[in-house]
Image (cartoon, helix red, strand yellow):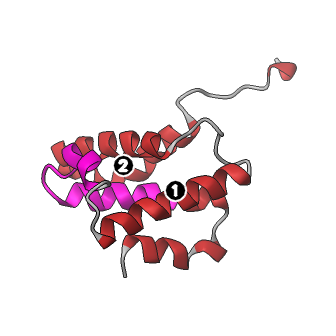
Amino acid sequence: MSLAETSRARDSDLTPGDAVRAYLEELARNMSIYQSLAASIGTIIQCGTPGCNAITAEGHRLLQRGQEAGAIRRDVTYEDFIYVVTAISIAIENDRSSKSRIGHLVDLFLNGVSVKVDRRFR
């Protein structure tokens, strides 16, 4: 089953935000498998093959679904996803032992590095 098919198959099981997270983690994991693929991902997503087109279409679908549900900011683009996944994949490619950190790195992208403190209770 392809990445896009797997993503669509779990649609009913995940919230829009969790679906985006799963897609980004899987995309980063898949890209890190191929040496230097991460460096050329901009070319890959525009390659025109059925697989590339399906992955891109699924990313756009998940982004729109997440934005409509209020789980993803309106100013986020699919290209933002690609930039972050590329950075994660390059980091993983350079340190094979850190594949287990993909989820953590995706979480940093989705939730930031700041600790949110409710100032009303300080």
Q: In this view, does 37 lie to the left or right of 113?
A: left
| Disc 2: which residue | 101
Q: Indicate yes or no whether the magenta region holds residue 32.
A: yes
Q: Residue at x 32, y 70 (%)?
A: 51
Q: Which amino acid does label 1 sit on?
A: His
**Which residue is situated farthest in the left direction here?**
35
Mark identifier at residue 60: 1
CA separation, marks 2 and 1?
24 Å
Q: Residue at x 39, y 64 (%)?
A: 55
Q: Considering the numbered disc 1 on the image, is that residue within a helix, a strand or a loop?
A: helix
Q: Quadrant of residue 114?
A: top right
Q: Residue at x 34, y 54 (%)?
A: 28
| Residue 64, image x, y percentages | 62, 54
Q: Which residue is drawn at 57% across and 59% down?
A: 62
| Residue 17, image x, y percentages | 63, 55
Q: Indicate yes or no whether the magenta region holds residue 109.
A: no
Give whichever of discs 2 and 1 has the lower sequence position: 1
Q: What residue type is labelled 2?
A: Arg
Q: Is residue 68 left or right of residue 18?
A: right
Q: Is the residue marked by circle 2 packed among few (<14), some (14-19), or many (20+) residues within 10 Å?
A: some
Q: In which quarter of the image is residue 111?
A: top right
| Residue 78, image x, y percentages | 48, 47
Q: Give the range drawn in magenta.
A: 20-44
Which residue occupies the foreground of this view, 16 or 63? 63
Mark identifier at residue 93: none
| Residue 73, placed above or below residue 29 | above
Q: Considering the numbered disc 2 on the image, is that residue within a helix, a strand or a loop?
A: helix
| Residue 108, placed above or below residue 10 | above
